[in-house]
Image (spheres, helix red, strand yellow):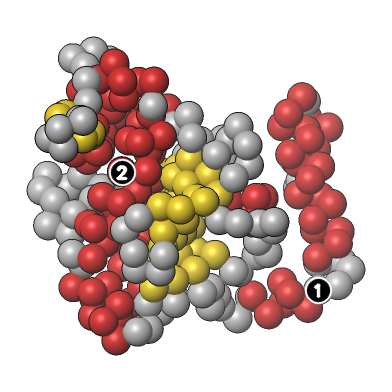
């Protein structure tokens, strides 16, 4: 007995049709890739991305099935290795699986402009935390990124007011990616592989407005725009 695809309508019908077309091409046409993947996966990249529906790494980067082991969460955060309370346990388990079991060669923390999670973190820093059951406790991980400093004309450091952070949220978005990379280095089996040269950590930030990609140097901690020209 089978469900009738005509029972779907609207967007669900379009998505079901997409699966039908994929099945027609990959399972009844050229079956080589999917047959190979049935034997297991061997991705080279572990991606920690955001849940945001506008930023699909597979679509943006032209990824094929089996190439990227993906972890998505609100604001693409990586909890510290020893973070208490069980928060982020699923994220840490996925990172462990990707690094230790799949033995990926690269980890990318993939942030983006206009991130709703980071906006909520900035609002929380301003004393206007959104009402939520779980989001608030998760976004505690982004609070350090909301402490941005600037240098005045006398060379003295001053903390930027939250009002400025709201206007220049990209500063927090990129800082949060760097914080997640720092947290990753605190995972002993990540640190071991980075030191051995078998694992490389990357920070990426995608600009929704321009399509530009900002990246850190491999295992680095400063963002620069990638030159596609």
Q: Are marks 2 and 1 in contact (CB under 8 Å)?
A: no
In the picture, the disc for residue 4 is: none
In the rendered view, would you say 144 is above or below 182? above
Taking depth in this image into account, of 30 and 189 the one nearest to the observer is 189
Q: Circle 1 sits on which residue?
A: 31
Taking depth in this image into account, of 2 and 57 the one nearest to the observer is 57
Taking depth in this image into account, of 213 and 45 the one nearest to the observer is 213
Report which quarter residue 208 is drawn in.
top right
Report which quarter residue 229 is drawn in.
bottom right
Is residue 54 among what the camera can see?
no
In the rendered view, would you say 60 is above or below 55? below
Is residue 108 among what the camera can see?
yes
- Tell whether 63 sits left or right of 21: left
Q: Circle 2 sits on which residue?
A: 175
Q: Count neighbours of disc 2 (C-alpha within 10 A) and say few if under 14, some if 14 to 19, many if 20 or more.
A: many
Q: Earlier in the sequence, mark 2 or mark 1?
A: 1
In the rendering, at what x and y percent does residue 61 appear? Answer: 64, 56
Q: CA distance from mark 2 to mark 1?
A: 43 Å
Residue at image position (10%, 48%) is: 84
- Tell whether 139 sits left or right of 197: left
In the rendering, at what x and y percent does residue 6 appear? Answer: 83, 32
In the rendering, at what x and y percent does residue 103 appear? Answer: 41, 79
Residue at image position (60%, 81%) is: 39
In the rendered view, would you say 195 is above or below 90? below
Taking depth in this image into account, of 143 and 69 the one nearest to the observer is 143
In the rendering, at what x and y percent does residue 131 appear? Answer: 27, 15
What element does badge 2 sit on? helix
């Amino acid at each position: 007995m089978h469900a009738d695809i005509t029972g779907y309508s609207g967007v669900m019908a379009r998505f079901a049709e997409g699966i039908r077309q994929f099945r027609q091409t990959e399972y009844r046409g050229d079956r080589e890739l999917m047959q190979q993947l049935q034997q297991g996966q061997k991705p080279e990249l572990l991606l920690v991305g955001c849940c945001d529906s506008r930023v699909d790494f597979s679509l943006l980067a032209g990824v094929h099935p089996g190439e990227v082991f993906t972890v998505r969460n609100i604001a693409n955060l990586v909890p510290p290795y020893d973070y208490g309370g069980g928060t982020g346990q699923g994220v840490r388990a996925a990172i462990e699986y990707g690094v230790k079991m799949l033995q990926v060669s690269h980890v990318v923390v993939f942030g983006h402009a206009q991130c709703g999670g980071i906006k909520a973190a900035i609002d929380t820093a301003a004393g206007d935390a959104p009402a939520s059951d779980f989001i608030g406790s998760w976004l505690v991980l982004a609070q350090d990124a909301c402490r941005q400093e600037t240098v005045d004309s006398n060379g003295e450091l001053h903390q930027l007011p939250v009002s400025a952070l709201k206007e220049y949220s990209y500063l927090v978005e990129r800082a949060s990616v760097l914080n997640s990379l720092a947290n990753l280095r605190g995972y002993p089996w990540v640190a071991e592989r980075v030191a051995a040269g078998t694992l490389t950590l990357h920070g990426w930030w995608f600009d929704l407005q321009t399509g530009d990609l900002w990246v850190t140097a491999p295992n680095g901690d400063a963002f620069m725009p990638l030159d596609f020209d």
